[in-house]
Structure formats: structure tokens, C-alpha cells
């Protein structure tokens, strides 16, 4: 451990290392978006149960789950809500059929259950083609700003490693 101490031997290097770790954590969601693969419709998992919507607090979006045999499965639609906000109460407790796929694990992020098609009481509310287009557009137009900041922070950290130390040398010491 003492051999690595030179990496953070001053305050600037500590701050730069913190920035690298911080943006590494945030960049996982950007990386998850960029690496998202759209599965074929016939490869989707189909589950049936009752819709249960947990209201989000503040800026947290509503959680959409499907209750099957007293077990809840949480679904995600990427950065958007799965269901229109004005319709959540209409769908609460209704019988539903969900076509979904588990996305890849990226870093510390556990893969999400991505919703691709939703049928409520026999009526398709979200269809596969529209949802696949939505995910592809999110992937294509996602700015990946956290990933960019992660790369910049790594470069800054390495530049600090090779920069001259600002501590003035002690000359003429006896």
C-alpha cells in the first residue's frame, strides 16, 4: 500500500482521484445505455400477473412492478416512465401480460428488467416495435456526459501524476 501512496500524495491528486471514482460510478448508466442490445421478440420472457405501481417520491419516478404469486418483478423502461403518468391509477391492480428481457450487468449496476411489450386486460398498451425504437433512439441520442467526464477526469489524474510537484525544493539545508 505504501508503494501506491505517491498516487495521492497531495490534495490535488486526492481530488482528481475522487473525481475519477465519482464519474466511474455515474458512467455505468451511460455505458449500460450504449451497450444495450435489443433482443428479438421471440427471445423475450413473458410474465403474467397484476400491475402494482409504487408512487415515486419527489423526483423519483413511479416504480412499475408485476405481482406474480405474491412476488414482485420490477420493470424499467430506461430513462422514461413505463406507463403514462395520467394513466397509472387506471392500471393499478389490473391483469397484465409483460414481455421483457434482462439487460446486462455493467460494473456495480445489476441488469434491469427492460419492458418491451405490455398488455393490460387483453389490450396492448405498449408494443414491441415502438419500445424497441424508443430504446434505440435513447441509445443513439444519449449524450453519455458522465462517460465523457469520466474520461476527462482520468486524463486529468494522469496529467497530475506526471506534473512537477509545486513543493519548492529545500536548498542549502545542512
Image (cartoon, rainbow, N blue to C red):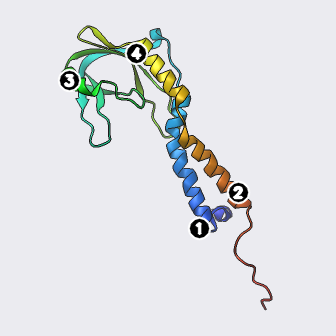
Q: Residues within 10 Å of mark 3 (few under 14, many from 20)?
A: some
Q: Of the residues under marks 2 and 1, which one precedes in the sequence? A: 1
Q: Nearer the viewer, mark 4 or mark 1?
A: 1
User: Which residue is tagged 2?
Assistant: 159
Indicate the quadrant containing the C terminus: top left, top right, bottom left or bottom right.
Answer: bottom right
Q: Residue 106 versus residue 128: which sits nearer the camera?
A: 128
Please state if 97 lies on the left or on the right of 160 as rendered.
left
User: Can you tell which of label 3 and label 4 is closer to the viewer?
Assistant: 3
Earlier sequence position, callout 2 versus callout 3:
3
Say which of marks 4 and 2 sits in front: 2
Which image quadrant: the N terminus?
A: bottom right
Q: Which residue is mark 4?
A: 45
**Residue ID for mark 1:** 11
Element under disc 1: helix
Where 103 sits versus 157, above or below?
above
Residue reaching furthest to the bottom: 174
> Would you call the spot at circle 1 few (<14 residues within 10 Å), some (14-19), or many (20 or more)?
few
Q: Are marks 3 and 4 in contact (CB under 8 Å)?
A: no
User: Would you place residue 54 above or below residue 118 in this image?
Assistant: below
Counting residues from the start of the chain, the first of labels 4 and 2 encountered is: 4
The residue pinned by badge 3 equals 92
Query: Image quarter for residue 56?
Result: top left
Q: CA distance from mark 1 to mark 3?
A: 53 Å
Picture residue at 46% right of the left edge, 8% below the top: 42
Residue 158's quadrant in the figure? bottom right
Q: Earlier in the sequence, mark 4 or mark 1?
A: 1
Q: CA distance from mark 4 to mark 1?
A: 51 Å
Residue displayed at 20% across by 18% down = 94
Amino acid at each position: 500500500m505504501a508503494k501506491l501512496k505517491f498516487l495521492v500524495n497531495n490534495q490535488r491528486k486526492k481530488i482528481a482521484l475522487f473525481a475519477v471514482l465519482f464519474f466511474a460510478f455515474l458512467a455505468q448508466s451511460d455505458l449500460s445505455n450504449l451497450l444495450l442490445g435489443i433482443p428479438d421478440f421471440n427471445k423475450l420472457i413473458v410474465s403474467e400477473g397484476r400491475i402494482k405501481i409504487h408512487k415515486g417520491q419527489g423526483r423519483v419516478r413511479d416504480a412499475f412492478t408485476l405481482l406474480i404469486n405474491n412476488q414482485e418483478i420490477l420493470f424499467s423502461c430506461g430513462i422514461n416512465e413505463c406507463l403514462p403518468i395520467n394513466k397509472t391509477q387506471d392500471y393499478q391492480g389490473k391483469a397484465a401480460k409483460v414481455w421483457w428481457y434482462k439487460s446486462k450487468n455493467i460494473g456495480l449496476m445489476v441488469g434491469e428488467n427492460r419492458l418491451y411489450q405490455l398488455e393490460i386486460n387483453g389490450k396492448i398498451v405498449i408494443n414491441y416495435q415502438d419500445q424497441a425504437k424508443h430504446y434505440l433512439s435513447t441509445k443513439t441520442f444519449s449524450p453519455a456526459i458522465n462517460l465523457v467526464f469520466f474520461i476527462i477526469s482520468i486524463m486529468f489524474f494522469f496529467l497530475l501524476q506526471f506534473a512537477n510537484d509545486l513543493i519548492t525544493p529545500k536548498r542549502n539545508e545542512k
